[in-house]
Image (tube, grey):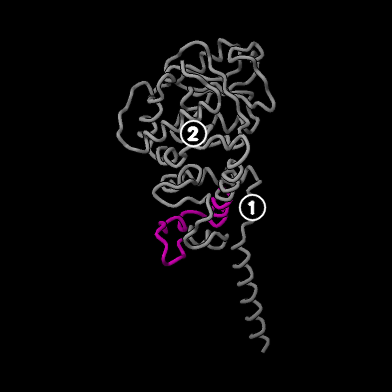
């Protein structure tokens, strides 16, 4: 009888541990976990199907209220694990990601939902654009290079981007930038501009999946401002600045496009055209006029 009781106790504890693992230990308000979840999300290529911000693409959105199997934590965990028989989502993630990593991805998913809801009202609601098309574009670097040079009037323009709630500049060439830390991308004219302003340039690698890093660090308060090619600033402000904290001021001079974006790659993809139109609307919202 004692052996049976012990066995039942062990089974009960095992079930309890299993159930506990189906509860997300993280909160979408934890910025560090959200950042880690986002990194895993892009690393595993989730954005290729669901979009950079979860707005959907080849696969459903996860920032609305329409779900195929359910929106609770346990269901999302099982989906990523590949444990739902009817699912069409690839099952390989469960064999690659640890349980902890899966929870971090789910936390990023929850964060995207909250950010999308916030964007629906107030000043941020002015960005009423086709984010879905740009999410699909971001999944393929060739499409991104087809979109950005299409922004007529902006090919040779750079902007100063800063957090309007903590900084205030009268122009992109404001003397107050002297000595401040400014984010720039390598292989772009931004480094030259920063030098002319006597600002401390913090250079970021111009890798395909990290082009938005300067704005991420700006929003996190790690740099004082960013100098970016205008089309790139529009693309990542649309994705990252849902609360509309950022402001943009254009530089008066013209500069060359970043390396890799000099040409006009042609594409008849409808998503490319829609994304280009969306980015032009973003720049209008931020009050940036083409040269």
Checking the image for residue 210, the label placed there is 2
> Residue 25, how many percent across, how many down?
64, 56
Residue 191, placed above or below residue 84: above
Which residue is drawn at the image coordinates 51% and 18% (left, top)?
Answer: 190
Q: What residue did someone put label 1 on?
A: 26
In the rendered view, tell whether residue 207 sits above or below residue 95.
above
- Magenta stretch: residue 240 in it? no
Q: Dot 1, crowdedness within 10 Å: few (<14), some or many (≥20)?
A: some
| First in residue order: circle 1 vs circle 2 | 1
Helix, strand or loop at mark 1: loop
Q: Which residue shows up at 42% across the image and 57% down it?
A: 89
Q: Nearer the viewer, residue 86 or 82?
A: 86
The answer to whether residue 103 is magenta is yes
Query: For this rendering, which residue is in front, 89 or 102?
Result: 89
Distance between mark 1 and mark 2 Cα atoms = 25 Å
- Look at the image and give the residue range highlighted in magenta: 82-108
Residue closer to the observer: 20 or 164: 164
- Of 124 and 147, the residue lying toward us: 124
User: Which quadrant is the N terminus positioned in?
Assistant: bottom right
Left/right placement of residue 143 relative to residue 230 reads left
Residue most toward the bottom?
Answer: 1
- Residue 213 image offset from top left, x and y in percent: 54, 32
Q: Quadrant of residue 218?
A: top right
Q: Residue at x 47, y 43 (%)?
A: 42
Q: Position of residue 29 (x, y in %)?
A: 66, 46
Q: Position of residue 37 (x, y in %)?
A: 55, 47
112 vs 143: above or below: below
Q: How many marks?
A: 2
């Amino acid at each position: 009888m004692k052996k049976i009781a012990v066995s039942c106790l062990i089974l009960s504890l095992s079930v309890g541990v299993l159930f506990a693992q189906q509860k997300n230990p993280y909160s979408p308000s934890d910025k560090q976990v959200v950042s880690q979840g986002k990194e895993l999300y892009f690393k595993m290529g989730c954005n290729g199907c669901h979009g950079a911000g979860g707005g959907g693409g080849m696969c459903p959105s996860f920032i609305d209220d329409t779900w195929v199997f359910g929106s609770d934590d346990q269901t999302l965990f099982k989906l990523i694990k590949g444990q739902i028989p009817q699912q069409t989502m690839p099952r390989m993630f469960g064999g690659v990601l640890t349980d902890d990593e899966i929870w971090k991805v789910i936390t990023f998913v929850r964060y995207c939902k909250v950010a999308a809801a916030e964007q629906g009202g107030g000043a941020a609601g002015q960005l009423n654009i086709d984010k879905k098309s740009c999410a699909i574009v971001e999944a393929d670097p060739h499409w991104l290079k087809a979109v950005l040079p299409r922004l007529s009037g902006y090919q040779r323009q750079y902007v100063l981007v800063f957090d309007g709630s903590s900084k205030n500049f009268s122009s992109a060439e404001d003397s107050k930038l002297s000595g401040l830390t400014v984010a720039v991308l390598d292989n772009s004219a931004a480094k030259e501009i920063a030098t002319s302003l006597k600002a401390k340039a913090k250079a970021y690698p111009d890798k395909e999946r990290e082009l938005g890093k300067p704005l991420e660090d700006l929003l996190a308060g790690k740099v004082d401002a960013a100098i970016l090619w205008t089309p790139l600033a529009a693309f990542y402000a649309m994705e990252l600045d849902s609360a509309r904290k950022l402001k943009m001021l254009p530089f008066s001079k013209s500069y060359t496009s970043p390396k890799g974006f000099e040409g006009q790659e042609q594409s008849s993809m409808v998503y490319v055209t829609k994304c280009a139109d969306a980015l032009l609307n973003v720049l209008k919202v931020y009050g940036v006029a083409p040269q």
